[in-house]
Amino acid sequence: MPSVPDSSAVPSSSAVVETSALHGSAVPAPPWRTRRKAPAARQPLSAEAVIETALRLVDRDGLDALSMRRVAQDLGTGPASLYAYFANKDELLEQLLDRVVGEIPLPVLDASGDWAAVVKRSCWDSRAVFLAHRDLVKVARANIPVGPNSLRYTEAMLAVLRGAGIPDKVAAWGMDQMSLVIVADAVETSIHVSHGRQSEADAAPYLAQIRDYYASLPVDRFPNLVAMAPAMTEGSGDERFAFAIDLMVDGLARHATGRVVESSRVSGFVGGGGK
């Protein structure tokens, strides 16, 4: 058995490579050694980088999977470094929501003057954007948005409503309640998706089960539920959302005078939220 030389007297393999490299030729490492991967280049840390990384995590894994630690890991840094930009997770979520609101096209009243069509289109646009980001919309519950994109959107929508001659209180409350409908619809859709009901076809067995249950109830105690079992469970999510928005906009129309409120003439809104 060969003797083992003193390790302190023999240069390490890395030292051999380095020494040989100095003489112009590198010695290849033994083939059984695991090659080290080159470290991935870190992207410069910024508030925008944190927000975009958080959004990718939510889009991929859902809101419950988001944490400051997960975001930091994806950025190749430690959680403490994120607090230079955000006081806590709630503040990150608030700005993350505003980032998504920036994807909603700003409502603008065109030459046709059809304010109701503009409002309805904007409701559909808002819903589509929220649905594109899994269950991030849950952040909007009981949260009055004050980020720059949210302020721009609110200003633009109020300009459309006031431009139709809708009184200030009705415009303010109407916009608030339409937002609740949009958020509630998007949240419910995200819950359906989490339960495996990603399409109307996926949801059909569940709805049929509920319909059959309603129909089987004692008719003497639940005559209306029994009679209306089909109506209670029919219609797609899109059809029901359209129904809700039509009801709300039709209600607003009762207050529209057609007289433009002068301060509602806002310039600079050409569609598309800022990011």
Image (cartoon, rainbow, N blue to C red):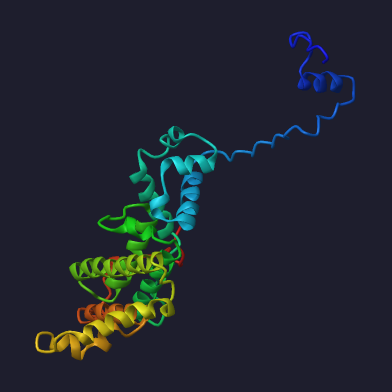
Q: Nearer the viewer, residue 72 or 209?
A: 209
Q: Is residue 13 left or right of residue 227?
A: right
Q: Residue furthest front?
A: 1
Residue depicted at x 38% and y 81%: 204
Residue 275 in view of the camera:
no
Residue 233, quarter of the rendered image: bottom left
User: Viewed as shown, does residue 16 lie left or right of 275?
Assistant: right
Q: Position of residue 136 (x, y in %)?
A: 39, 58
Query: In the displayed structure, would residue 164 be above or below residue 176?
Result: below
Is 40 situated above or below 188? Answer: above
| Residue at the far left in the pictured view | 220
Q: Is residue 227 left or right of residue 59?
A: left
Q: Quadrant of the N terminus?
A: top right
Q: Is residue 168 above or below residue 250?
A: above
State whether residue 262 appears in this view. yes
Q: Is residue 111 shown above or below 94?
A: below
**Residue at (36%, 72%) from the top-left corner?**
123
